[in-house]
Image: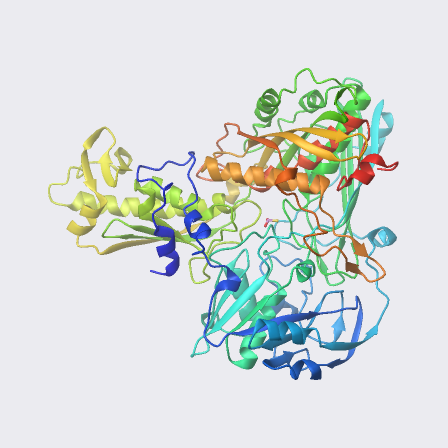
Amino acid sequence: MTDLIEALQAPTADRGTGPVRTGTPVSRVDGRAKVTGQAKYAAEHPAPDLAYGVVVSSPAAKGTIRSIDTRAALAVEGVVEVLTHLNRPKIRSFDIAYKDMTAPAGSPFRPLYDGHVMYSGQPLALVVAETFEAARYAASLVTFDIDVEPHGTKLSANLDRAYKPKPLKAGFEPPPDEKGNTDAAFDAAPVKVDAEFYSGVEHHNPMELFASTVIRGDDGHLTIYDKTQSSQNSRWYVSHVFGLSKSKVTVRNTYVGGAFGSGLRPQYQLTLAVMAALHLKRSVRVVLTRQQMFTFGHRPETVQRVKLAAERDGTLRAIWHQAIAETSPIEDYVEVVVNWSGLLYACDNIKLDYKLVKLDQYTPIDMRAPGAAHGVHALEVAMDELAYELKMDPLALRLKNYADRVPIEDKPYSSKELRACYELGAKKFGWEGRPLEPRSMREGTEFIGWGMATGVWDAMQMFARASAVLHADGKLVVSSAATDIGTGTYTVMAMIAAEAMGLPLEDVTFQLGDSTLPVAPIEGGSSHVTTVGSAVAGVCEKLQKTLFKHAQKLRGSPLAEAKFKDVEFAGGTIRLKHRQEAALPLTAILNDSGVVKLEEKYLMLPNMLKQRKFRRLVHSAVFVEVRVDEQTGMVRVTRVTSAIAAGRIMNTKTATSQITGGIVWGISQALHEESYADHRLGRFMNHNYAEYHVPVNADIHAMDVIFVEEDDRIVSRLGAKGVGEIGLVGVAAAVSNAIWHATGKRLRSTPMTPDKVLGGGP
Ligand code: MOS
């Protein structure tokens, strides 16, 4: 067994010895390893003879390198090599080699490929030294002579170049065709809203810096500890880029300190670390700086326009939603921004449009509910504006247009308990009796406002494999190359297996984060429970059946005549459901059958034929109280109630943490986060934790999470639909709507900083 398993099996106070059931609160099984420092992250794995690489970033936004002066850097004591496009080891020349599992259409970026500079901050050299300090100092001495070309990084200056992207990306659906005649319906309707929205660039900023430790074995095998949301994606990428056979490269990501989408694609520190390890034939670690965390993908800057029209009773007549977002010169980064507006409210006329503009930036990348975070934001603020035009309660407007069938396509929802979210959320928050008029509530120097919004996200299922080994001592190890980016994968998968096999949680270990384990998809889209969880349930069912067969064959077996459906797995035994004393311990079954360990493998494929008949979504209703200081424009989000419909909740404790985390990031989107570029330099200027604001404890107040009853066996055999991103969607809109209710000021751009709250424009 690996160190990992030992660390996970260390007894913890919370872990308990009783039976475990999904749907209950269970503390993280990896909690102890994390707080005691046993959990090692990508940059923490030691290796003998480890060299340290430090990246040198481009000062120019666009151009061609004429020459690089590495002499001063090479003269620093301890410096081993400076890698550039001129002396790097050979890498492949076809685009296909650089296509990782989540690459969009286009030509992926190739680190140190040639002398072409395509964005400010691009890695242009890697200084490798015996110590990190020597490498860092020497990196400051590398200079470039770059033939600079004019660049364009400003979206608003380039909107006329917008084009419709090719829909070549897994998980991306282009906007569907228009339903009805939206323009005519809009013109004819008596009550209208027409609003423009702006959201700036955001960067994920996980606490853990991107890092790769490449440990080279004597046989040349590379074991890579990488910060990634998929060990197999990084392994795939490295073997393709460098032409290394799959068996020569193992990638591990046993612990990941947050990622939020930034780890969905291999990042350039991985390529550079492998380059150096191959070139120098030794182990190498590359860790990016916080500044460099702003140089490999971001939530794209986006402008949107939403037009809504309704009858005087609130019946929606037209929904029109357009978005224009940025992408890089080389790839079409696409996300689903506007489609949500065709999924939420009953309406006969819906028109959706999504375009891209190429800027001289790195390709954007998925970030925390990509697309929905700002797409649903625009729709839900516009809905609030419409409610005010109608003199109608914003919640009543949503209920008036509640969709029981998907509006934009002729399909039912696989399940949709959004009405329960509205009702339970409103009740818990105390929405009833809210005055309609803004500026109705104040206390001291602060105006108080209540806002609400709907949230929606996909309930996805991908395919995965899992294996399970039951040892003669009753310990169960279940494995899949899944990832836990802090979300609770270790815990939930162990719970699913423990419940299935009737074993105490401490006897079950879920092994993940290693590219040699059975195939699992990237951890993204809040889909790991529906996908890997279903694979775990599947492999355990196979194990149950095999154990049952063994049990029946034992001499004098009390189960000899039983059918599989008549038995249950509980208390470490197989027993008859209706005669529990007829029980055989699993350990006894293995020992008496002469089996040292029982192993099963399982491939979970989604039932696509069944699934595609339904639109599969998770929903939420978010209610927010803000207090806005009249003098300073400071906004405090003092209360949030989030009611979630996401199918069966497997672990109510970690799921609640997921949703509160989502709320925090929603408040962050609403009030804090933006990467500001100096367009003369084409560079993000607030590239540090001091100036790129994320919420701290003082920004976060009361949060209430409610899970409404829902059970969806179309999305997954577990009844689960997945949580995570749904916690964020709608939060910023609810904050915006609450600011309006508090102050009478309508803000249509994020973040809603005090200057905007006090200022004249939106
Ligand atoms: Mo998430 S943005 O799918 O990691």
Toward the front, the furthest residue is 444
Q: Number of numbered discs present?
A: 0
Give coordinates of residue 235: x percent, y percent: 52, 65
Q: Nearer the viewer, residue 323 or 32?
A: 32
Q: How is the image coloured?
A: rainbow
Relative to 642, is 333 above or below? below
Q: Quadrant of residue 390?
A: top right
Toward the left, the furthest residue is 556
In this image, 16 relative to 266: left or right? left
Give coordinates of residue 717: x percent, y percent: 44, 39
Q: Nearer the viewer, residue 536 or 77?
A: 77
* Quadrant position of the C terminus in the picture: top right
- Residue 311 in view (yes/no): no
Q: Nearer the viewer, residue 254 or 138?
A: 138
- Residue 108 in view (yes/no): yes
Q: Nearer the viewer, residue 291 or 705?
A: 291
In this image, 35 relative to 635: left or right? left
Q: Residue at x 58, y 77 (%)?
A: 129
* Quadrant position of the N terminus in the picture: bottom left
In this image, 724 relative to 452: left or right? left
Give coordinates of residue 95: x percent, y percent: 65, 68
In this image, 490 relative to 455: left or right? left
Q: Quadrant of residue 149?
A: bottom right
Give coordinates of residue 406: x percent, y percent: 64, 32
